[in-house]
Image (spheres, rainbow, N blue to C red):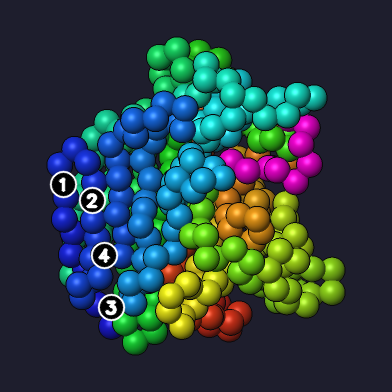
Amino acid sequence: MSAPVQVTHAMGEKVVVSCEGVELMTYVYRPDPEVFESRKPYVHPLRTLSGHPVTGYRPSDHRWHKGLQMTASHLSGQNFWGGNSYVHGEGYLALPDRIGWMRHDRFEALTAEEDRLTLAERLTWIENGGAEWARERRTLTVHSVEPEQGSWALDWSIHLTNVHDEPLRFGSPTTAGREAAGYTGLHWRGPRDFTGGQVFGPDGQDGQDGQQRDGEAGAAALMGRRTPWLAFTGTHDGVDAQSTLVFAHAPENEGAMHPSSHWFVRSEPTPTVAFSWAFHEEFALPPGAAFSYRYRIVVADGALDRRGIESHLRSW
């Protein structure tokens, strides 16, 4: 039976979800002060039921990486990812006039039942010059908090509508010419002690021979590929413990505008995973049109195996 969850709302700043005295996640929805980092809401810290942190925040290598957040690295010439922008033939350049941001408009719902929290939010995507390009309806749901299993789940859904008078073109550094850099979409940055962690997917889907691999070899085998889920297991500094995050697509994503997307994943030099919706090719969202995706992130104490992961995802 799921354990009860509690919510604390610091008005105009953040929402904190707790269980049995452990703050499982903090959703910060106020704009960050650094415009160059693309101001937008994010989840940090994200923790296991044992209290172990499983997100990184503003690491020295990429200050714009902030826990778990929705991004768009290449969007009609704008950068809603943050930091330097990739330009083919020139590399990464500091182009502050390309940095867009996401404005929190309001919460439509913030409801805490005994074992479930639902946060429904309205946001606006704004390009660098101030024009409103997209409206987003975002829903975060915390559920399946299972102390006996040492795990809990976060569902993240997005419904994005183009309110611009031109098509919105979604791409990535790879669509702009850089190999194996298709990052965009919902992005997780792991803590520094997860560097070199184990990455694997469903049986037979993390390499040509189906063998499970460690560290960056597992990440490289899944980079740019499509699988229903991907798992990342890291070992914590300071404590004798491991934690696993499972990133999974909802079944209906298969029928989305860009079906199932592709994984952007690295174990070294940075622990990172993104549900990339434009890894290999751009897609255009016409004026007035919308797309939707739903994802699940399972946060677990210990090193889960494939059988344990599949059991967590059966409800989908």
Tell me what residue is drawn at x 46 percent, y 20 percent.
Answer: 127
Q: How far apart are marks 3 and 1 (CA)?
A: 25 Å
User: Do callouts 2 and 3 mark residues in contact (Cβ within 8 Å)?
Assistant: no
Look at mark 3 in the image and give the residue it sits on.
Answer: 2
Location of residue 210 in the rendering, given as x and y in whole percent from the top left corner? 79, 75
- Element under label 2? strand
Location of residue 72 in the rendering, given as x and y in whole percent from the top left corner? 54, 35
Q: Residues within 10 Å of mark 4 (few under 14, many from 20)?
A: many
Which numbered disc, 2 or 3, marks the residue closer to the eye? 2
* Residue 22 location, quadrant: bottom left
1 vs 65, left or right, is left
- Element under label 4? strand
Q: How far apart are marks 4 and 3 (CA)?
A: 16 Å
Instruction: Report the span colored magenta.
Output: 176-186
Which is nearer the eye, 240 or 299? 240
Query: Relative to 251, does residue 126 appear above or below in the rendering?
Result: above
Query: Relative to 139, does residue 302 appear above or below in the rendering?
Result: below
Look at mark 2 in the image and give the residue it sits on.
Answer: 15
* Residue 122 location, quadrant: top left
Q: Which residue in the rendered view is the most extreme toward the bottom?
A: 148
Q: Residue type at mark 2: give it.
A: Val
Query: Relative to 286, does residue 295 appear above or below in the rendering?
Result: below
Q: Residue type at mark 4: give it.
A: Glu
- The label shown at residue 23 is 4
Q: How crowded is mark 1: few (under 14 residues within 10 Å), some or many (20 or more)?
A: few
164 vs 174, left or right, is left
Q: Which of marks 4 and 2 is nearer the N terminus?
A: 2
User: Do callouts 2 and 1 mark residues in contact (Cβ within 8 Å)?
Assistant: yes
Look at mark 1 in the image and give the residue it sits on.
Answer: 10
